[in-house]
Amino acid sequence: MEDKLVKDVMTKKVITARKDTSVGELSKILLKNNITGVPVVDEEGVLQGMVTDADIITEDIEPIFPLFFDPLIVSYAFMENFEKYKKDIKEYLNIKVEEIMTRRVKTVKKDTTVSDTVKILVKDRINRIPVVDENNKVIGIVARADILKSMLSDAGKE
């Protein structure tokens, strides 16, 4: 069986973000489109980085609840922590994508084989990989789901 090329399985309509997109805006984009990450591009569509839901959800955000649970003081502590939490989240959602994005991004070309792409996804433990042209402009994206769809469609043909 001949190995497919990335151009045969990639998603051509790529949802992207810019470096100056806020984390809040990015969160809405991810949720609205039911995706977990996007390439970050400049005005010409040239790849600048990648940003995912894992980049958004960090350990830096303080928990709401205190480490101890004393029923006599929990309501006061909760209100105090909750107000701080709301303020921290509001500030965090206003920071720009460029502050949390990954700048060193693995990419493939449209003529890369799907098997070589799978090797990169597995080895680097990533869920998606941008497809770029010779000028590093994003022309597509391959997610693990795209590969699964391709495998299922191939199995149905045999």
Image (cartoon, rainbow, N blue to C red):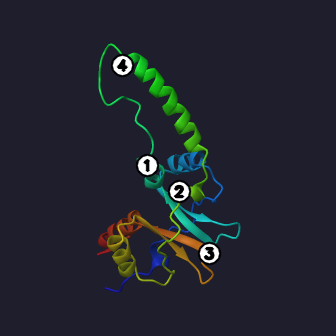
> Of callouts 1 and 4, which one flags the residue occurring earlier in the amino acid sequence?
1
The answer for how far apart the CA atoms under marks 1 and 2 are is 10 Å
Percent of width and height locating residue 28: 56, 45
> Of callouts 1 and 3, which one flags the residue occurring earlier in the amino acid sequence?
1
| Marking on residue 58 | 1
Mark 1 vs 2: CB contact within 8 A:
yes
Amino acid at dot 2 = Ile
| Marking on residue 102 | none
Amino acid at dot 1 = Thr
1 or 3: mark nearer the eye: 1
4 or 2: mark nearer the eye: 4
| Marking on residue 137 | 3
What residue is shown at x 71% (from left), y 66% (from top)? 43
Mark 2 vs 3: CB contact within 8 A:
no
What residue is shown at x 44% (from left), y 66% (from top)? 128
Of all residues, the one furthest to the right in this rendering is 43
Mark 4 vs 3: CB contact within 8 A:
no
The answer for how far apart the CA atoms under marks 4 and 2 are is 33 Å
Q: Nearer the viewer, residue 22 or 17?
A: 22
What residue is shown at x 28% (from left), y 75% (from top)? 158
Residue assigned mark 2: 100
Q: Nearer the viewer, residue 3 or 156?
A: 3
**How many residues crowd around disc 2 within 10 Å: few (fewer than 14), some, or many (20 or more)?**
some
2 or 3: mark nearer the eye: 2
Q: Nearer the viewer, residue 92 or 29?
A: 92
Mark 4 vs 2: CB contact within 8 A:
no
The answer for how far apart the CA atoms under marks 4 and 3 are is 53 Å
4 or 3: mark nearer the eye: 4
The answer for how far apart the CA atoms under marks 1 and 3 are is 29 Å
Amino acid at dot 3 = Lys
What residue is shown at x 63% (from left), y 81% (from top)? 135
Residue assigned mark 4: 74
